[in-house]
Image: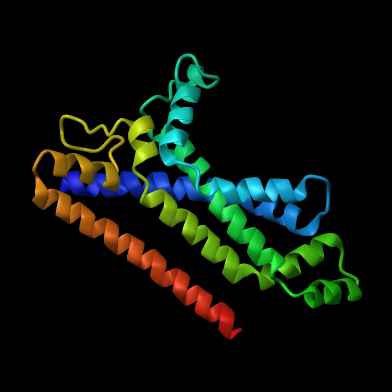
Amino acid sequence: PTYVRSIIYVSLYVSVTAVVLSTLVSLPIAIALGFSEFPGRRFLAAVITTGMGFPSVVVGLLVLFAVSNQGPLGTFDLVFTREAMIVSQFVLATPPITAISLAAVGGVDQDVRDAARVLGGTKVDVALATLKEARYGIATAVLAGFGRAISEVGSVLIVGGNIAGSDGVSKTRTLTTAIQLEARQGRYDTALVLGAVLVVLVLIVNAVVVRIGDEGVMR
């Protein structure tokens, strides 16, 4: 039980932290792209959309290089740490959160923005009114990013090392990497328990996304 609990804790800690940081970065980008017209805007939006399908193992490899002794972040000694895993999941979660948030902001009726301007609202007021209307889509974006992060295996395996202490407590072992390890070593009972936990988490996220989407349509 201690082993399983520690794995669940590490998985949630890394994924939630990465998604929170990603949201703090993604929303301003989505707002800037949604409210501005400038040269290269379409190209930047296309790059963000393309990033949604970027191979996770490549992201893990790039992050591992960045935090290695030869990389720009080598002085922070982040190799095989939870912080490196957070960086990796941050990179993976940011494109879907940004792209879906941008679509949600862009899907808000122009009348909402016009009404805010007619009422004497500033650019900030217009942005806030638009975000209020797009809140269901943005919530869906955040949950989609969490789903991408919690189910990730390739990048976190590369940068985290799938490490557990001699006492059985997970250091950088997540649900996905633990399932891979336990199955490879023939401990199918533990792998099935961990798999069930992961499936439940993903189902909960999907259920919340559907519920939010339904509420957004009803409103």
**Quarter of the image where one finds residue 100:** bottom right
> How did the renderer colour the structure?
rainbow
Tell me, yes or no, if residue 113 can be seen here. Answer: yes
Residue situated in front as seen by the camera: 141 or 170: 141
Q: In the rendered view, does 12 fall on the left or right side of 90?
A: left
**Quarter of the image where one finds residue 161:** top left
Residue 29 horizontal/vertical position (percent): 69, 50
At 80% from the left and 66% from the top, the residue drawn is 126
The image shows residue 218, relative to residue 117, as above or below, that is below
Residue 201 horizontal/vertical position (percent): 32, 61
Q: In the rendered view, does 6 fall on the left or right side of 27?
A: left
At 52% from the left and 41% from the top, the residue drawn is 91
Residue situated in front as seen by the camera: 123 or 58: 58
At 71% from the left and 72% from the top, the residue drawn is 108
Residue situated in front as seen by the camera: 19 or 95: 95
**Quarter of the image where one finds residue 133:** bottom right
Residue 88 horizontal/vertical position (percent): 46, 37
Tell me, yes or no, if residue 83 can be seen here. Answer: no
Task: Indicate the quadrant containing the C terminus: top left, top right, bottom left or bottom right.
Answer: bottom right
The image shows residue 215, relative to residue 117, as above or below, that is below
Residue 77 horizontal/vertical position (percent): 43, 20
At 9% from the left and 45% from the top, the residue drawn is 187
The image shows residue 197, relative to residue 149, as above or below, that is below
